[in-house]
Image (cartoon, rainbow, N blue to C red):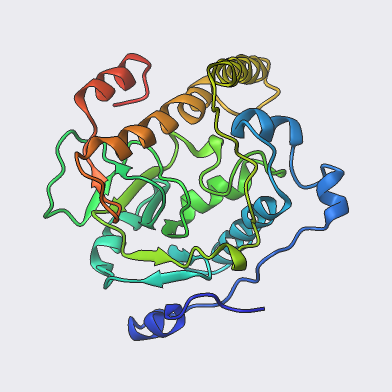
Amino acid sequence: DIIRSKNLKSKLVDFGLKFQISPGLVPDEADFHAGLLHSTFLSSLICQRSLSVGEIGCALAHKNALNDLLISDYKFGFIFEDDAEIISEFKLEEIVKLLNSNLPTIIMLGWIPGHAIAKSIHVSFNEEMIELVTSPTCGFAYAINRPAAKLIIGTNKKIIDLADWPIYTLNKIHYFATQSPWVTANQDPKFSIIGERSTSFPKSRITVFLSRMRLIGSLVTLILLSKTKKLNVSPRQIVHRLLIRDMLYKYGKSQLKIEVKDNRAVPLSLKFQKLLKLINLYE
């Protein structure tokens, strides 16, 4: 019942952008616990933990917003979570050039945590838009075209992964990002419908070992489900989601010699490029 952002509406008006509010969604607790909204089994394998009712609500709200785009006549649109704070002027010509395409395309305007990882081993600071090897997490502001929206909406009826970005979109959607975020967000947990996530970090050798064994078990189970056509996700997407994406995030955080407060698109290391080529995840 509130808009958490202090400047979102006024900035969109300043830029001359038409907008509408897509209502948030609080799932019914009974439906959530009955598994009517998401697959508890698949989501626990993919996310390596249980999803909260707030996370399911967030994923469904993103889908509702994308449905609003698809029932309109627009070729593409912007999706902002309601705590998005615009911190830079949009270069609309660059956005239009990328999204006016038949290829499913998403441009990340703001993200956390870590750095967006570019496909190229060289990133020019003169570039406005940089193609990414994988999507950054927490996409609270992004531009998306109709082919990408159709892919996200039409693939799964039940939620099986986080809102940003589901496993079945990997290697199918072309992701781009601005050199540094044009949008940030008010991350005050008091106003979050997601609440605290159930992620726990291993603190001893035995818990590290057990978490790795669980990851291997999940990887094998998901690939078997894929091979037997019980999961509409390719083995390539499974490897990308469970292994590559997290590796690149950790790499992106540690690549810079000094700690920086703002996120940036950083170049892909040559060793990771060779690794991705080896498992056919890089062109």
What residue is at 30 percent from the left and 63 percent from the top?
96
Residue 232 visible to the viewer: no
What residue is at 65 percent from the left and 51 percent from the top?
55
What is the count of numbered marks? 0
Is 64 displayed left or right of 187 in the figure? right
Residue 173 in the image: state x and y as whole percent: 43, 42
Is 33 displayed left or right of 175 in the figure? right
Q: Quadrant of the C terminus?
A: top left
Quadrant of res 245: top left
Residue 180 visible to the viewer: yes
Is 61 displayed left or right of 255 in the figure? right
Residue closest to the eye, 193 or 106 = 193
Above or below residue 115? Residue 48 is above
Residue 107 in the image: state x and y as whole percent: 36, 54
Residue 61 in the image: state x and y as whole percent: 64, 60
Residue 118 in the image: state x and y as whole percent: 26, 40
